[in-house]
Amino acid sequence: MTKALKTKLLAGLFVPAVAAFGVPAFAGGDKSTAPSAASSTTTVPTSTSAAAAESKDALFARLDADKDGKLSSDEGRQDSNVQGLWKQLDSDNDGSVTQAEFMATPALEAAPKK
C-alpha cells in the first residue's frame, strides 16, 4: 500500500470518529464534559428559572408603588425595560398590568436589567 493511500484511509476513519465523539475525547479531556451525540439539547438549571422568577417578583413589587396588585402606566414608566415592553405586558389592553400578566411575559426575562 502506498503512503498516500494509507493517509487517506486513516483520515477516512479518524475524521468520522472525531465528529461522532467530539474532539475533547481524543485530546485527553474528561469524557464526562464532552458533548454527547445522544444529548443535543441544553437544559437550564431550575435554580436559574427560580432566580428569574424571583427577580420578576421583586421588580413587580418595587414598581407597584401603591401596592394594588397591578402596575399603572405611570408605575411602569419607572423601569425602561417595562416601559419598552408595556404593550406585550398589558395582554388584555386594559391600561394596567397585573402580576399574572407581568410574570407570564417571557420577553421580560430576556430584557437587560436597568
Image (spheres, rainbow, N blue to C red):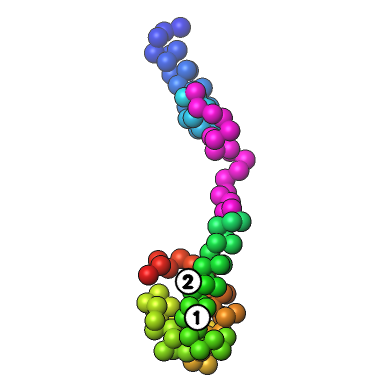
Q: Residues within 10 Å of mark 2 (few under 14, many from 20)?
A: many
Q: Which residue is mark 2?
A: 108
Q: Residues within 10 Å of mark 1 (few under 14, many from 20)?
A: many
Q: Amino acid at mark 1?
A: Leu
Which circle's residue, 1 or 2, is located before the other in the chain?
1
User: Which is nearer the eye, 20 or 63?
Assistant: 63
List x then y, in percent, for residue 62. 48, 78
Element type at marker 1?
A: helix
Q: Is 55 displayed left or right of 112 in the figure?
A: right
List x then y, in percent, for residue 104. 57, 75
Residue drawn at x 39%, y 81% is 78
Residue drawn at x 50%, y 80% is 89
Q: In the image, is residue 31 part of the stretch drawn in magenta?
A: yes
List x then y, in percent, for residue 41. 57, 49
Q: In the image, is residue 15 part of the stretch drawn in magenta?
A: no
Vertical placement of residue 7 versus 27, above or below = above
Residue drawn at x 43%, y 19% is 8
Q: State whether residue 44 appears in this view.
A: yes
User: Which is nearer the eye, 40 or 1?
Assistant: 40
Outermost residue to the bottom: 94
Chain part drawn in magenta: 28-45
Q: Is 110 displayed left or right of 99 in the figure?
A: left
Vertical placement of residue 77 versus 12, above or below = below
Q: Which residue is mark 1?
A: 89
Element type at marker 2?
A: helix
Q: Amino acid at mark 2?
A: Leu
